[in-house]
Amino acid sequence: MNSMKNFLKPIIFLTVLILIISVVKQGYVYKIGNVAQTSLYQGLRVVKITEEKSKIEENNISIVVKMPQIHYDNKEVERYINTYIRTDINNYINHQRQFSDIEDKKVKKNISMNYHVPFENSDIINIVIYKNTNEGKDDFELEKDSYVFDLKTGQRIYLDNFLKDNNDYKDVIEKYIGDYIGKNKLRLDSKKIEIDKYTNYIISDGGINIYFNPYKVKNSDLNYEFKIPYTEFKNKIKIVESNNIVANVDTQTITKNKNYINSVINIPMITTKNKKIEKTINDKIKNDIMSFYNSSEDEAKRYFKDYPDTQNKFVVNADFYVKKNSDNMLSIKVEYYKYSGGAHGYYEDVSYNIDMINGEDLTLDKLFKDEHDYKARINKEINNQIEAIVKKDKEYKGIYEFKGINDKQKFYIQDDKIVIYFDLYEIAPYPAGIPEFPIKAKDINYIIDDKYIDIFK
């Protein structure tokens, strides 16, 4: 009898396990906050991770890196995630080396980078990159970057998508953190606590950890990290769905450090099935970035010739950010920066909104039907947002001088939104930076050309 019981135990356990997984999958909805279920999923790992180690040793800086390298059955997803993380880490390293050279501090900066996987199941993986910086004996700063990826598509899942069925997630999180600070009488900087799409979060048992970098610094017991229980949200957290990518985006980096210039230039290198479109996009963006760099380098040489004794190097940078990579739309924003001394530097954003069906770089007017005055509708949306900003914070009263968008208005596409933005000084003083105004496509869909409706899924 005992031998029969021992024989049946593993069969019963396996049957129950299969039933649990079947029930969870069948409804395509699960509550991540359930600790038992989270542990079950974490036991069924589908991604293997190895690490790449590297060390950079220079006069004023030492950087030790352990970079994760994922191995996954879907090689397109594997490549996209690895490229995404590698690009971010390399960009951080290059800029830290640049800062070190420009600052020319006597105390050496030591940076160590490591990683951790706090959550993984068959649908998503959460990878955290830790950045610990030490200067001298007591000066330290702790930062981390959390990435949540959809393992079906490779897309990064930002906070707004993770909590997409809770439209009031910003208010819920801000209230919870505010109440926590008040209850514990913490003397935290409230300006640092701002919830939006890009707010860092880590998936944990029973909730998500929201944090703000640097989450911990020297001479302070305060920690800018807060755990928000899933029970705070009205709706269950669903399995995240994202759309397939339309292009892989790698990076070509050009660095130059001479007596007259210090430069980090990141150029997007797009790979897609249509090689003609791929070449057109790559040539266009690379030529634009290199044109900026070459003219800036000439300017730096002239500056150094006129001021040979200057202690300031001419800084020239170009970075890019992929804003949308799905639904036949690739939207990339390139950020240019240069500084030659003085109160502040100069920066400008240039975006490329590419229809991946034909390779056309879309201008704003092409998105709308000819019979509608798209400018008037967008102007109304922007004016409403400016009024809301001023209502929330009176310090912004009189800051904006918006008179309307122009024929060559700058914009990019992100998720289901058109984001209108303006250059420095165009509608506001320098401290306001580059003002951006996101407009949801569903609010103006009646004026959007039918052939572009699907790109705002």
Image: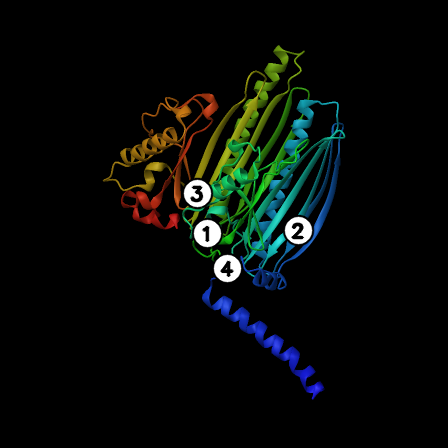
* Dot placed on the residue nearer the N-terminal end, 2 or 1: 2
Q: CA distance from mark 4 to mark 3?
A: 21 Å
Badge 4 element: loop
Badge 2 element: strand
Q: Which mark is residue 171?
A: 3
* Dot placed on the residue nearer the N-terminal end, 1 or 4: 4
CB contact under 8 Å: marks 4 and 2: no
Q: CA distance from mark 1 to mark 3?
A: 10 Å
- The residue that label 2 is drawn on is 69
Q: Is residue 97 left or right of residue 358?
A: right
Q: Three-letter amino acid code at disc 4?
A: Lys
Q: Three-letter amino acid code at disc 2?
A: Gln
Based on the displayed image, in which of its 4 quarters is residue 217 positioned? top right
* Dot placed on the residue nearer the N-terminal end, 4 or 2: 4
CB contact under 8 Å: marks 2 and 1: no
CB contact under 8 Å: marks 2 and 3: no
- The residue that label 1 is drawn on is 233
Q: CA distance from mark 2 to mark 3?
A: 36 Å
Image location (x, y in percent) of residue 417: 39, 43
- The residue that label 4 is drawn on is 31
For the residue pair 237 and 147, the one nearer the viewer reads as: 237
* Dot placed on the residue nearer the N-terminal end, 1 or 3: 3
